[in-house]
Image (cartoon, grey):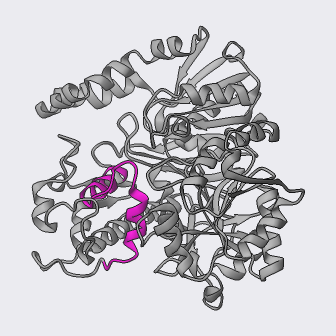
C-alpha cells in the first residue's frame, strides 16, 4: 500500500508511506521560499515521489490531514447561527470556504489523481504523528495548537497501537496557540511564525513585576486572560482578545489600555515588553502542567507522554514538563507544527487497513531532498569562479579542525530534515565558546535578535555530564539547565536563564554528524558544538546545494561543506 499524506494550508507539506514505512517527507516552504506557506504543496509532492522513485499513478490513497466539511460546519456555519457577528467570519473567510469546499476536486486536478482520497481529523492526526513514531507501547498523548477544524487541542491515551481520544472540548476561541500568536503580534513580530522569538525573550522578563497603570503583576493579568477552570478545560477571556471577531487585530482595547500601545517591529524593546513575554510563557506552562497533573492522576499507570501540535515546539514548556517529573520520558514529534499532519494522516489511513505493527518510522526526520555527489558537482561548477573546491576523504575530521580554529561552517549533508529544526544535515556550526560567538552568529551571520539563543549538539553519551537531562533529545525540543561546572566550557549555547535547547547526537540518528562532533571532542576535549539552522532570519532552511552556495557567498560563513566537498571563497 502506497499512501501520499498531505497537509494543505499553514505549513503545507507532503509525505510518502510505502507498506507502512515512512520514506519521504517534504515541506513546501523549502521550495517556494515562503516561510510557513499555505500554497498547495505541489513541489513537496513531486520531490517525495522522486525520492520514493514513484509516480502519482503508483499511489493507492491520498490522505489529507484535515476534514474540510467539518471545518466549514463547525467553524463557520454553526457559530453564525448562534452569534450574529460571526457572519463576518464567513464574509472574511470566503476564499478559505471556497478552497475547502472544493478541496477534493482541487487535489485531483493539481495531481491528476483518480483513486481514493481520505480526510482525517486535524488533532487526531497530531496525536497519531507523535504516538506511533515515539516507539512507546503505552503513553498519554496530547496536542495543542492554534486551531484544527474548530478544536484547539486533544488529550488521548494509547496502548499497544490503540489510540483513544479522551477529551476534545477545548474549542475556538479558547486556544493556547492563538493567545500566544496574539501576544507575538502585539509585541511586533509575525504571528504564526515568530512565536519562538517570544519564548526566547521570556527569559529576560519578570512576570511578578507590577504594571504601573494597574498596580497588578503581569502574571496576575495573564491568569485573568487564560483562565484554567479544572481538569482539562481552560478559557481565554474574550475581554482581552479580538481574534474571535476580527483576527488581524488580535488583542482588544482593554488589553492595550493595560499594556500600552502595540510595539512596532524594530522599535525599542523595553523591560515592559520582556515582562509581557515572560508572563505569557509562565501562564502557558502553568495551564499545561495543571492539565497534565490532572491527566496523570486520572491515569497513574501511564508514565510516558507524547506531545504534538504547534505549541509542542515550545521547548521551554517541554523542559518544564520534563523537569516536573510527572513522566519518566517524553517524546515530541519533530514536525509538531501543521507540516506533521501529513505524517499523522498517512499513519491513520495506513492503520485503517493494516496492522499498526507494520509501521516503520525509525527515520522520523531525515526525509527530505537529497543530492548525489555527481549532482552536487554539477551545481558547484556553475559557481566555480567564486569557489575554491576540494573533495575530502574524511570531511568530518577536516571540519572538526576548522571548528576548533573558530571557523563558521555551513554543513549540508544527505537528506533534509522534516520540521523546523536543523539536526545536523542543514546546519550552521561553530564551537560553543567564547560567549561572543553567540553574538557574532546572531548579528553577522543570521541577522537575528541579539537575545536569541543557540542550541548545543552534544554526543549523547556526554549529555548528562553537561546538561540536566536524563533522556535522549535527538530533535532539539526539550530545554534543560546546564550543569554548573561545565558552563564555562560552552557559554555560547547557554541562555540567560541557564537553559539550553539540547540536541543529543548518536550514531543511530546521524552517524556523520556524530563523527564530526566526536572528532571535535578529540581535539578540544569538549563534546559539544553550536548548531543552528542553515538559513538567514525570515527565510526557510536551505534545501538545495544551490541554496547553500548562494547563502554561503552572500553571508559571513567561512567554509561550506556539501556532502564530501569542502568549499572556500576565492
Q: Nearer the viewer, residue 435 or 57?
A: 435
The one nearer the camera, 499 or 26, is: 26
Q: Is residue 24 visible?
A: yes
Q: Is residue 515 visible?
A: no
Q: Which residue occupies the extreme top position in the image? A: 114
Q: Residue at x 59, y 13 (%)?
A: 116
Above/below status of 287 relative to 245: below
Image quadrant assignment for residue 290: bottom left
Q: Is residue 115 magenta?
A: no
> Chief secondary structure of the magenta span?
helix
Residue 383 % position (x, y): 67, 44
Residue 374: image quadrant is: top right
- Residue 434, percent from left and from top: 59, 83
* Whole-percent x, y for residue 338 in the image: 49, 41
Residue range in magenta is 177-206
Q: Which residue extends farthest right?
A: 393
Q: Is residue 224 above or below residue 76?
A: below
522 vs 541, left or right, is right
| Nearer-the-camera pick, 517 or 404 | 404
Q: Residue at x 35, y 36 (%)?
A: 150
Asked if the stretch drawn in magenta spans residue 192, the answer is: yes
- Residue depicted at 27% across the width and 61% down the height: 187
Where does the C terminus fall, quadrant-wise? bottom right
Query: Residue 513 in the image: x percent, y percent?
Result: 76, 60
Count of marks overlaid on the render: 0
In this picture, residue 214 sits left or right of residue 392: left
Residue appearing at x 55%, y 40% in the figure: 30
Amino acid at each position: 500500500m502506497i499512501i501520499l499524506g498531505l497537509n494543505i494550508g499553514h505549513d503545507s507539506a507532503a509525505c510518502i508511506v510505502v507498506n507502512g514505512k515512512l520514506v519521504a517527507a517534504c515541506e513546501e516552504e523549502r521550495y517556494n521560499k515562503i516561510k510557513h506557506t499555505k500554497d498547495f504543496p505541489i513541489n513537496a509532492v513531486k520531490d517525495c515521489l522522486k525520492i520514493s522513485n514513484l509516480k502519482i499513478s503508483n499511489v493507492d490513497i491520498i490522505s489529507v490531514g484535515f476534514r474540510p466539511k467539518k471545518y466549514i460546519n463547525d467553524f463557520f456555519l454553526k457559530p453564525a447561527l448562534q452569534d450574529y457577528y460571526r457572519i463576518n467570519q464567513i464574509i472574511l473567510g470566503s476564499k478559505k470556504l471556497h478552497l475547502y469546499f472544493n478541496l477534493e476536486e482541487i487535489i485531483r486536478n493539481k495531481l491528476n489523481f483518480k483513486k481514493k482520497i481520505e480526510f482525517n481529523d486535524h488533532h487526531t492526526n497530531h496525536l497519531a504523528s507523535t504516538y506511533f513514531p515515539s516507539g512507546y507501547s503505552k503513553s498519554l498523548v496530547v496536542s495543542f495548537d492554534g486551531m484544527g477544524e474548530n478544536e484547539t487541542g486533544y488529550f488521548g491515551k494509547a496502548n499497544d497501537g490503540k489510540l483513544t481520544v479522551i477529551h476534545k472540548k477545548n474549542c475556538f476561541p479558547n486556544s493556547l496557540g492563538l493567545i500566544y500568536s496574539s501576544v507575538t503580534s502585539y509585541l511586533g513580530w509575525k504571528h504564526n511564525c515568530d512565536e519562538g522569538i517570544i519564548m526566547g525573550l521570556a527569559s529576560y522578563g519578570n512576570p511578578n513585576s507590577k504594571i504601573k497603570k494597574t498596580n497588578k503583576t503581569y502574571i496576575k493579568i495573564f491568569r485573568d486572560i487564560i483562565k484554567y477552570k479544572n481538569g482539562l478545560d481552560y478559557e481565554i477571556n474574550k475581554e482581552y482578545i479580538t481574534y474571535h471577531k476580527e483576527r488581524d487585530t488580535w488583542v482588544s482595547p482593554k488589553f492595550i489600555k493595560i499594556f500600552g500601545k502595540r510595539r512596532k517591529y524594530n522599535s525599542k524593546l523595553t523591560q515592559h515588553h520582556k515582562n509581557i513575554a515572560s508572563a505569557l510563557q509562565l501562564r502557558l506552562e502553568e495551564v499545561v502542567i495543571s492539565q497534565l497533573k490532572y491527566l496523570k492522576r486520572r491515569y497513574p499507570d501511564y508514565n510516558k507522554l507524547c506531545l504534538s501540535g504547534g505549541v509542542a515546539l515550545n521547548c521551554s514548556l517541554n523542559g518544564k514538563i520534563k523537569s516536573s517529573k510527572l513522566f519518566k520520558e517524553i517524546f515530541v514529534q519533530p514536525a509538531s507544527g501543521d507540516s506533521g499532519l501529513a505524517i499523522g494522516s498517512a499513519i491513520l489511513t495506513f492503520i485503517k487497513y493494516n496492522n499498526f505493527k507494520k509501521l516503520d518510522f525509525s527515520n522520523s526526520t531525515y526525509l527530505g531532498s537529497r543530492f548525489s555527489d555527481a549532482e552536487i558537482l554539477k551545481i558547484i561548477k556553475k559557481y566555480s569562479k567564486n569557489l575554491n573546491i576540494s573533495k575530502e576523504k574524511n570531511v568530518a575530521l577536516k571540519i572538526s579542525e576548522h571548528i576548533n580554529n573558530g571557523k563558521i561552517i555551513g554543513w549540508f549533508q544527505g537528506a533534509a530534515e522534516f520540521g523546523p529544526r536543523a539536526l545536523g544535515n542543514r546546519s550552521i556550526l561553530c564551537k560553543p565558546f567564547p560567549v561572543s560567538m553567540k553574538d557574532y552568529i546572531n548579528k553577522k551571520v543570521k541577522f537575528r535578535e541579539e537575545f536569541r539563543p543557540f542550541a548545543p549538539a552534544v554526543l549523547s553519551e556526554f549529555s548528562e555530564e553537561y546538561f540536566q537531562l536524563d533522556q535522549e533529545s535527538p530533535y532539539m525540543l526539550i530545554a534543560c539547565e546546564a550543569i554548573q561546572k561545565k558552563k564555562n566550557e560552552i557559554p555560547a549555547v547557554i541562555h540567560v536563564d541557564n537553559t539550553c535547547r539540547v540536541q543529543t547526537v548518536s550514531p543511530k540518528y546521524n552517524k556523520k554528524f556524530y563523527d564530526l562532533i566526536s572528532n571535535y571532542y578529540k581535539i578540544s576535549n569538549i563534546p559539544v558544538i553550536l548548531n543552528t539552522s542553515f538559513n538567514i532570519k525570515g527565510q526557510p532552511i536551505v534545501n538545495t546545494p544551490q541554496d547553500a552556495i548562494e547563502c554561503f557567498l552572500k553571508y559571513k560563513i567561512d567554509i561550506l561543506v556539501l556532502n564530501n566537498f569542502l568549499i572556500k571563497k576565492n
